[in-house]
């Protein structure tokens, strides 16, 4: 009985600040408990099936893009002289992809470096930096792109 009375006197002296402090401490304790409890459950249970599916899909897409970007591009086939009346053309090509999305990714990267780029409409999707009648101009574009870290070749 004495302990309860002392508590009431303390409560009356301090007013609501003690009650408010106790309420805030209780709310914080509950919040910390919920957060830590969820964290422990995630550690023990591991990621859920949806999280795994999303992570696997992201990894697969990244691997495909990296594989396509580093896929060796075959050298252009040796061709005969152009037919009479046709001018010789040099195509500056940055990549060949089975996936339109990967071709667009490379296109965006090249455009970000200031190049004028387009992608062919049919599969395999070819990423081109230009078609030139002058081999020297084609080589200048190729050299500039290679200085910026891209693997480029000139198709004839």
Image (cartoon, rainbow, N blue to C red):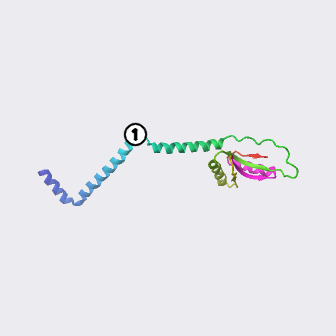
Q: Is residue 31 left or right of residue 108?
A: left
In the rendered image, residue 139 lying in the magenta stretch gets the answer: yes
> What residue is shown at x 37% (from left), y 45% (from top)?
38
> What residue is shown at x 63% (from left), y 47% (from top)?
102
Q: Is residue 155 left or right of residue 123?
A: right
> What residue is shown at x 76% (from left), y 46% (from top)?
154
Report the front residue among 22 and 128: 128
In the rendered image, residue 137 lying in the magenta stretch gets the answer: yes
How many numbered discs sit on the rendered protein? 1
Residue at the farthest front position: 122
Report the front residue among 97 and 149: 97
Report the front residue among 14 and 121: 121
Residue at the farthest top position: 44
Q: Which residues are magenta?
A: 124-148
Q: Would you place residue 17 above or below residue 155 in this image?
A: below
Q: Would you place residue 34 above or below residue 45 in this image?
A: below
> What residue is shown at x 64% (from left), y 49% (from top)?
100
Residue at the farthest right position: 84
Q: Which residue has dot 1 on it?
A: 45
Horizontal and vertical percent for residue 20? 26, 58
Horizontal and vertical percent for residue 1? 11, 51
Q: Is residue 70 left or right of residue 25?
A: right
Report the front residue among 114 and 119: 119
Q: Residues within 10 Å of mark 1 (few under 14, many from 20)?
A: few
Horizontal and vertical percent for residue 33? 33, 47
Task: Give the SS element for disc 1.
Answer: helix
Horizontal and vertical percent for residue 89? 80, 50
């Amino acid at each position: 009985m004495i302990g309860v009375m002392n508590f009431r006197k303390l409560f009356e002296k301090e007013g609501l600040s003690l009650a408010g402090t106790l309420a805030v401490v209780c709310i914080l304790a509950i919040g910390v408990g919920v957060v830590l409890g969820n964290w422990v459950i995630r550690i023990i249970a591991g990621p859920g099936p949806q999280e795994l599916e999303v992570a696997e899909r992201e990894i697969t897409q990244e691997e495909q893009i990296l594989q396509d970007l580093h896929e060796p591009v075959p050298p252009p086939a040796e061709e005969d002289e152009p037919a009479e009346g046709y001018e010789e053309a040099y195509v500056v090509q940055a990549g060949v992809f089975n996936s339109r999305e990967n071709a667009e990714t490379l296109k965006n990267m090249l455009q970000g470096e200031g190049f004028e780029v387009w992608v062919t409409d049919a599969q395999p999707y070819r990423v081109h930096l230009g078609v030139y009648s002058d081999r020297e101009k084609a080589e200048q574009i190729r050299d500039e792109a290679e200085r910026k870290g891209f693997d480029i070749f000139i198709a004839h």
